[in-house]
Amino acid sequence: MMIRKLVIALCALSLAASLAFADDASMDALPRRVSTFSDAAEPAVTSLTMAQVKVTSHTDTAAVETAADVPEQKTTAPSQQKKILLNLASRILTLYQGDVKIRMYPVGVGKPDTPSPIGHYRVTTKEVNPTWIDPDSSTVIPSGPDCPLGYRWMGLFGNYGIHGTNVPSSIGGYVSHGCIRMHEADVEDLYDHTPLGTPVDIFYDRIVIDRNDDHTISYYIYPDGYGWQPLTVDRVKKALAGYGVEDFAENQDIYNKIVASDGQPTYVAKAYDLVVNGKTLKKRALGKDGRIWLPAFALSSALKLDSRWDSQQKVFVTARGQAAGIIKSDVVYVDSAMGRSLYGLEGHLTKDYVYTMTTVSEEVPNAQVKAKEAKTAAASVPSLKERMKTGRTTPQGLDN
């Protein structure tokens, strides 16, 4: 037990340094709480300071679980299995149940010279009220308000784990020797919802793209705290292309976001799969400013319809008609309201957020309709010869 506590102690070596770091001006530029990724379906995640934590619920006796005590989640249905994703660039830890985000927490991670390790891990140990032993002085600090590990420990491998802290101001920064720090209320909540064997994926990605339930796409760019990931406009565009909204993200806007690297959301558009006569196109229909915009040339190509863009008049022209268009990243888009006049298509947005278009049956000109009706009416009137046979000289239906 003492050996394991010595291992845990290494995670807290930077306590004194982190106290100083928390007062540094650079620390003030980092978010204390991050709420930019909240989904409507997610429960609100709140945080308490150490002064708000009820220490009376903690005892001096530590409760320890190891992976040998509890089997992995193999018997749990995939939709109910838990997993943790931790982005070191955003300093946000997300708990999933199946593919659904159920918790999100801000965290403190390793300093640039002692970065938290990226990779795929599992929760191998869990301990309530861990004791810290100072590796320099061998001073034992039991669980309580002075313990750098807080009141919960979840071991991942070697010296690394997820734990609480008695320096809540350090959360949101690059502050540790590699362990993951959390607000005390958050780590206790995570502890209660994380079984042993839970997979933990730790990665570093400055670009985070979020899709809401209504298919709204937003992106975030975080500071390069470790200096591992320089960004370019093209790299951000490529990331957005996976969601089909890259055309609506202007190059200058992306450049400005890279310079700012403020971790704040930038709304792009709503992305809908585009289906034409049963075939899904590579390009998507994009919703913005109350309209749904269609990729003009992609539709023409799908219908094998001749078309051109009049750059002077800013008009898109097909063999059927013409309509005003807009240019987004050198791609022409037209309002979906013009789908019938330009392409002979009617469209609608399904409840699954798919924009479906089908060819409309051609209407017969009025003159042709009248001629066809007259011909049909004439065919229904018996000839004079037929009327003579029946003794009737008045057309049927006109007798008094």
Image (cartoon, helix red, strand yellow):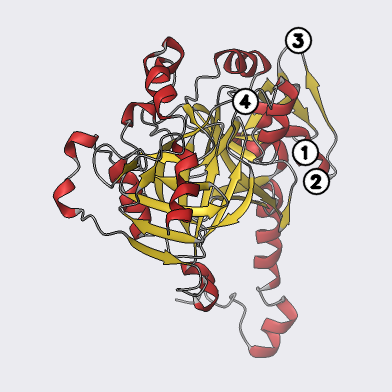
**Which mark is nearer the camera, 1 or 3?**
1
Q: Identify the residue at image location x=74%, y=48%.
A: 281
Crowdedness near tag 1: few (<14), some (14–19) or many (≥20) residues, C-alpha within 10 Å: some
User: Of the residues shown, which amino acid type is indicated by label 3?
Assistant: Gln
- How far is mark 3 from mark 2, CA to CA? 26 Å
- How far is mark 1 from mark 2, CA to CA? 6 Å
Residue 273 percent across, percent down from the top left: 64, 48
Crowdedness near tag 3: few (<14), some (14–19) or many (≥20) residues, C-alpha within 10 Å: few
Crowdedness near tag 2: few (<14), some (14–19) or many (≥20) residues, C-alpha within 10 Å: few
Q: Which residue is mark 2?
A: 302
User: Of the residues shown, which amino acid type is indicated by label 1?
Assistant: Ala
At mark 3, the secondary structure is loop
Residue 312's disc is 3
Marks 3 and 2, the one that precedes in the sequence: 2
Figure check: 223 above or below 304: above
Q: Identify the residue at image location x=62%, y=34%.
A: 205
Marks 4 and 2, the one that precedes in the sequence: 4
**Is the residue under label 2 in contact with that under label 1 (CB below 8 Å)?**
yes
- How far is mark 4 from mark 1, CA to CA? 41 Å
Q: Which residue is mark 4?
A: 226
At mark 1, the secondary structure is helix
User: Of the residues shown, which amino acid type is indicated by label 4?
Assistant: Tyr
Marks 1 and 3, the one that precedes in the sequence: 1
